[in-house]
């Protein structure tokens, strides 16, 4: 088999973002958004792995099941899609009690049902740690893609960022956090995205932090930015927020503010899309 060309030439091995590198070695034109649009269906999948995305000392089985499903549903919501079906694969440690399994599956089903989604199958395997992989199959009449920004567009994010990072740091210090913390309970902006979609050029959910995900959005559109509102690192590096990052024309700001207010959503404009190569600092926020 011929050797694949370097995706990141002239970059030292230890500095490469391996997740980004792997994705860029694949060649499907469907790759690049929060989910893949194929025909009239939208497909997405995320992993939720013990000691990478969560620790069992921090969360009970019900919380683990709920967050695992929410972070997967987030990709569909981010693309203005209606989740319909889910396939769930679970790696279960041998010492998992049946009561814990019940709590996990009930939480998965209950959370999916809140968004009109049905779990229709999957797989279970024995493993040393608790891992979940969930595939969501959705539909949308008007998907929101990452590509579509124009120079002069405003960049904004929903919600109040920073709580996920702040509470993660508390957990590392063995301090308690609130049961409704965004680390446990991401808020998905389904109503806002559905109403705002006609006025949005591009968007994505914020899973890897505002800094990193803004860079991804800009890379996709081959633009840079000019900062309009100062952002500190506690906000910029706060991963797994699952709020929305969106781009739109300045003339639509007033309309979008009204939609945000009606849906109980805070909308913060922080940058303007520009014809430069400016990027934010970016680093992994996972545990390992």
Image: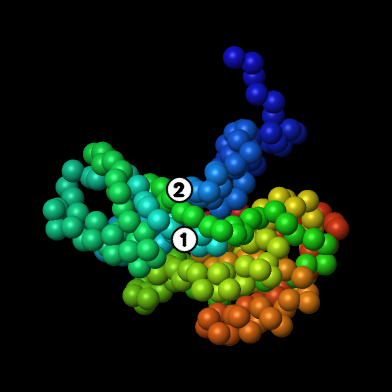
> Can you say whether 19 is above or below 207 in the image?
above
**Does residue 79 appear anywhere in the picture?**
no
Which quadrant holds residue 255?
bottom right
Q: Going from the N terminus, do you reach mark 1 or mark 2 first?
A: 2
Q: Is residue 49 left or right of residue 121?
A: right
Task: Name the residue rendered at 59%, 57% in the picture.
Answer: 143
Which quadrant holds residue 13?
top right
> Can you say whether 275 is above or below 36 in the image?
below
Q: Nearer the viewer, residue 146 or 156?
A: 146
User: Which residue corresponds to mark 1?
Assistant: 82
Q: Nearer the viewer, residue 246 or 130?
A: 246
SS assignment at label 2? strand
SS assignment at label 1? strand
Q: Nearer the viewer, residue 58 or 258?
A: 258
* Rendered image: mark on residue 45: 2
> Can you say whether 107 is above or below 283 in the image?
below
Q: Whole-percent x and y of residue 147? A: 70, 54
Q: Whole-percent x and y of residue 91? A: 29, 43
In front of the other: label 1 or label 2? Answer: 1
Q: Whole-percent x and y of residue 133? A: 38, 47
Scheme by which the image is coloured: rainbow
Q: Residue furthest top?
A: 1
Task: Name the residue rendered at 60%, 50% in the picture.
Answer: 33
């Amino acid at each position: 088999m011929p050797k694949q060309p370097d995706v990141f030439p002239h970059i030292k091995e230890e500095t490469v973002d391996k997740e980004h590198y792997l994705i860029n070695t694949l060649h499907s034109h469907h790759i690049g958004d929060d989910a893949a649009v194929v025909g009239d269906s939208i497909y997405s999948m995320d992993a939720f792995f013990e000691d990478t995305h969560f620790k069992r000392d921090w969360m009970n089985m019900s919380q683990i099941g709920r967050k695992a499903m929410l972070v997967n549903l987030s990709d569909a919501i981010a693309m203005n899609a209606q989740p319909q079906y889910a396939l769930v694969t679970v790696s279960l440690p041998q010492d998992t009690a049946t009561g814990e399994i019940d709590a996990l599956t009930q939480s998965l089903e209950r959370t999916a049902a809140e968004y009109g989604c049905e779990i229709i199958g999957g797989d279970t395997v024995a493993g040393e740690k608790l891992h979940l992989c969930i595939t969501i199959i959705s539909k949308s009449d008007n998907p929101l893609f990452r590509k579509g920004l124009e120079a002069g567009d405003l960049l904004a994010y929903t919600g109040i960022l920073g709580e996920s990072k702040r509470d993660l740091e508390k957990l590392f210090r063995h301090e308690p956090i609130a049961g409704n913390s965004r680390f446990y309970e991401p808020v998905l902006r389904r109503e806002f995205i559905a109403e705002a979609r006609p006025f949005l050029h591009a968007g994505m959910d914020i899973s890897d932090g505002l800094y990193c995900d803004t860079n991804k959005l800009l890379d996709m559109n081959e633009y840079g930015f000019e900062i309009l509102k100062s952002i500190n690192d506690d906000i910029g590096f706060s991963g797994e927020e699952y709020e929305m990052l969106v781009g739109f024309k300045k003339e639509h700001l007033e309309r979008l503010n009204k939609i945000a207010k009606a849906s109980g959503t805070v909308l913060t404009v922080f940058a303007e899309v520009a014809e430069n190569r400016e990027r934010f600092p970016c680093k992994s926020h996972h545990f390992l």
